[in-house]
Image (spheres, coloured by chain):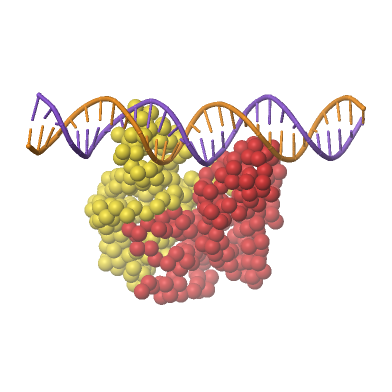
Chain colours: A red, B yellow, C orange, D purple
Amino acid sequence: MILEAARDLFASEGYEAVTLRKVADAIEYCPATIYKYFRDKEEMVRALVEQDIGALMERFRPSMDKQTPLDRLRSFGRSYIDMGLMQPNHYRLMFMTPLLPNDDPLYRQKRADPQTDSYGLFLTVVQQCIDDAVFKPALNDAEWIAQTLWAGLHGVIALHIALGKEETVEWRPVRERAIFMHELMLQGMLTEAHREDLPSVVAGETFQPA
Amino acid sequence: MILEAARDLFASEGYEAVTLRKVADAIEYCPATIYKYFRDKEEMVRALVEQDIGALMERFRPSMDKQTPLDRLRSFGRSYIDMGLMQPNHYRLMFMTPLLPNDDPLYRQKRADPQTDSYGLFLTVVQQCIDDAVFKPALNDAEWIAQTLWAGLHGVIALHIALGKEETVEWRPVRERAIFMHELMLQGMLTEAHREDLPSVVAGETFQPA
DNA sequence: TACTATAGTAAACACCGTTCACATTGTGAC
DNA sequence: GTCACAATGTGAACGGTGTTTACTATAGTA
């Protein structure tokens, strides 16, 4: 109930609105009660973040049905972009807010399992691509590739969330830029053979601004 | 004095340490005095951010001395990476924290001038590259290119600041990843002719983890 | 029935951003 | 010189925050 109320507050009223007293009010409990379940506010927020990261699995799972590893990789990227742009409050909480690392061993075990951890799942997709020889042979470290692809998409989304309202920059459409970034990175990583599959995006034909 | 004290607090004690009372204590004034100079705390922080963004110019200016536009672009990237990794607290404040846009016309004018705005300067370097026919011909929008390059580097740095201590991910060295990202994006954007200039980084020979 | 762990509470504490009425100081006009 | 006035700084307070402590009521178990 606590986490449910906190999640609603995050989604509806934004980042700063999540206050222990408001959460307590929402579930009609006393603020002090929350301390029976969490050591402090940060631990509560972290529990919420972990739940939400776990929930990402449902969003990514359909990508696994695609035929080729490369298709799965692309589908993963699109899902990630959609998630970030459609739920900016959750995104900010999950990926833009430094939190102390969780030392709960049960949590670590969960994160280590590709069946329950979305990053782990992404990592296996990348490994499938490596095994399928879609990447240049020198690129044989799944962590390296996964972290790079993740960072690229994160950069577009996070910059948009943090500075997208800064009017001194003539921002181009964010979704198009995110997809462009994805294809741009893939182009540099794929072998000649698989580069043929690239849509015209990277050539710059598709996403020219007006 | 106020901004100076606030900047010191950010740098030394981190993000949450910046409190009006601590700033007031540091300059031996009463908290209420700050309100004679800033409408509220957010306006104070925004003024600090703007000062710091302005100060970035000094860091980037040496890059303009490089001979070719492409060299300037590369040098810009390296400086940006160094800045982000060496001053994570400032970086977080400047580029990872959503602030209300500033409607001060004097500020806007300053941001519009490439001589005083670092993004504007970056934009002119990108435009120089376009004029030099370094990029694929279809990539002819400086804003599009600049925002993409910025986002790529930002992604590596921001993800590292926010989740770098998350031990469930086997992070690869962040500086190497940032440089890899930079070269990866360039490789996808440059013409065949200029791609020869690419260091071996992108091929994956240099940055293989142990 | 007695004991104990659990779930929840009321009240307080220190700190936060913010406001307001009030001193103090310096400046320019007459 | 002095009067008016704006600028600068202060002390005390207000409501809100995370957090702690002492306390009550309840449920389950020996």
Task: Judge by depth and name the residue closer to the eye, C25 or B63.
Answer: C25
Residue B91, relative to residue A84: is it above or below?
Answer: above
Residue A10, relative to residue B27: is it above or below?
Answer: below
Residue B76 visible in image: yes
Left or right position of B193 against A83 = left
- Residue at the spot 30% in from the left edge and 34% down from the top edge: B1
Q: x and y percent of residue A151 in the render?
A: 50, 55
- Residue at the spot 58% in from the left edge and 67% down from the top edge: A75
Classify residue B21 by image quadrant: top left
Task: Judge by depth and name the residue closer to the eye, A195 or B111.
Answer: B111
Task: Judge by depth and name the residue closer to the eye, D23 or A107.
Answer: D23
Number of numbered labels in the structure image: 0
Left or right position of C1 against A12 = right
Residue B159, relative to residue A135: is it above or below?
Answer: above
Task: Judge by depth and name the residue closer to the eye, B114 or B167.
Answer: B114
- Residue at the spot 37% in from the left edge and 65% down from the top edge: B144
- Residue at the spot 65% in from the left edge and 67% down from the top edge: A62
Q: x and y percent of residue B57 in the render?
A: 28, 48
Residue B153 visible in image: no
Q: x and y percent of residue D29 in the render?
A: 89, 35
Left or right position of A13 against A164 = right
Classify residue B9 by image quadrant: top left
Q: x and y percent of residue B198 in the render?
A: 38, 59
